[in-house]
Amino acid sequence: MLNKNVSRREFIKRNSLTGLGAVLTPSLLANSIEKQAISAPMSASTGPAIYSSSGRPALLGGAPLRTKEWPAWPIWKPETDEKQLLEVIRSGVWSRAKLANEFEQKWAQTLGVKRSLLVVNGTNALIIALNQLNIRAGDEVIVPPYTFIATVSAVLATGAMPIFVDVDPETFQIDPARIEAKITPRTKAIMPVHILGLPADMTRIMAIAKKHNLVVVEDACQAHLAELNHQKVGTIGHAGCFSFQNSKNLPIGEGGAIVSNDDAFMDRCFSYQNFGNPYGAGVGSVSIGSSMQGTKLRTTEYQAAIGLAQLERLDAQTTTRNENAGYLKSKIKDIPGIVPYKLYDEVTRGAFHLFPFRYQKEGFKGLPRAGFLKALQAEGVPCSSGYATLNNQPYLNDAFQSKNFRKIYPKEMLDFKQYVAQNQCPQNDRLCNEEAVWFTQNLLLGPQSDMDEIVAAIEKVHTYAEQLAKLNNK
Ligand SMILES: *Cc1c(COP(=O)(O)O)cnc(C)c1O
């Protein structure tokens, strides 16, 4: 699964830069990135574009439908983004100081939450949050299987046991109806993930958590500015965590944040990422020494400067992604074999880190998903099959065989075969192994005519599905 994600990040990089690099000089490249990503989404309409979906598919010798580059990612505008960054670099104040504070205040304000703490990455934001909510070895934490591995790695890092709850395939999110059956006396937390940037069903999850006295840590690492009933995700549970890794909707390169309305908790999180040095309500003074166990996961000032520059455009980009996603969904939903994502009724905004749909080969004359992806890619539309199943991989057994796990858990809980049998998620298996298809968020940043091209490419593959299936069988 790690490979898949790495290749996804690679994939974004490649699709935004190569092919194009061979034709354009660096300055022209920068120029065209500007046009694509900044001016294009702002123009309301580029007029009716006509894309023929009747020509032969590229895989069958036809011309690829899309030859233009897609919006590049990340976006960097020297004229607006570099001033503060250069000032920081020239100042020599590189460890966290006032810009990190400023970013934290702005991020909290943007989300409508009391506090935010900027740290090295999203994975460690999750680890810190779990740790400071007292999740420890011997505890069980409920997670969805349809996520990036870091969700589960964070649980294992605390010494707790991840317990997988299957997804609702229509929304790609953890299925609240299946959570209670997995709660045991060891269960201490639920970690919903707003995967793909689409909100999980927090209303039902919070009700279950309340009933069973569990803490909720939202993995909002893909869900910047997504909302349920106009409340930003990440601010609904006891804590929320974000990632600012390069592929994410607010890219810094590396970075992450914890957000919460609980001051005492946020003070402890701050202390923890700063050697346990006292902070806020934390007792003691730095000169006397640390009163709590900690580590070092601090950010830098130049990361904060990049984050502040990116934050300026996040809201407008999110609007563009929502508009394009809604339009694309409406245009492909009636193609047989294409089942786009569903949003819960309470969703007032998505983040659309990815645009997902389910591909059902029965609607495409039996053309397997891999053949569909290959044909669509040949048309110039980058796409992928997304995640592999996370609930049966060797990394889990590796943790179970560690000294710490063997000291804490009874032998039968560490029986990998038994664990896999108890953590089966057939809905997720089908998504991962057969049905899920993704477009990355940068494809949603261009003009609406880009969506028309994606639609036409899918229609073309649909029209020629039988021939493509034959090609696939050879
Ligand atoms: C990216 C991501 C993380 C980890 O964030 P990093 O900043 O890469 O450490 C965690 N959970 C999910 C769902 C993610 O997509």
Image (cartoon, rainbow, N blue to C red):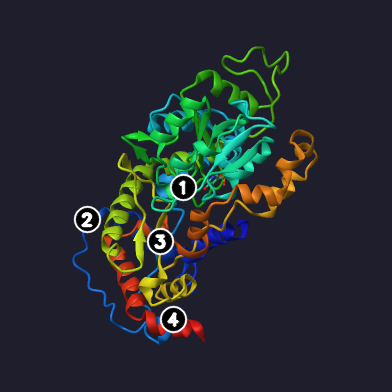
Residue displayed at 22% across by 55% down: 44
- Reply above or below: 20 against 286: below
Q: Kindly identify the amino acid type of the residue bearing the numbered disc 2.
A: Ala
- Percent x, y for residue 390? 59, 52
- Characterize the local packing of mark 2: few (<14), some (14-19) or many (20 or more) Cα atoms within 10 angstroms: few
In primary-sequence order, the first of circles 1 and 3 is 1
| Viewer-nearest residue: 260 or 147 | 147
- Characterize the local packing of mark 1: few (<14), some (14-19) or many (20 or more) Cα atoms within 10 angstroms: many
The answer to whether the residues at label 4 and label 1 have Cβ atoms under 8 Å apart is no
Q: CA distance from mark 4 to mark 1?
A: 31 Å
* Secondary structure beneath label 2: loop
Q: CA distance from mark 1 to mark 2?
A: 29 Å
Which residue bears the numbered disc 4?
A: 469
Which residue bears the numbered disc 3?
A: 358
| Viewer-nearest residue: 85 or 57 | 57
In primary-sequence order, the first of circles 3 and 2 is 2
Please give left or right for residue 393 compared with residue 431 in the image. Answer: right
Which residue bears the numbered disc 1?
A: 195
Answer yes or no: is residue 316 visible: yes
Which residue bears the numbered disc 2?
A: 44
- Percent x, y for residue 38? 34, 54
Q: Kindly identify the amino acid type of the residue bearing the numbered disc 4.
A: Ala
Hey, which quadrant is residue 361 in on the image? bottom left
- Reply above or below: 86 against 276: below
Q: CA distance from mark 2 to mark 4?
A: 38 Å
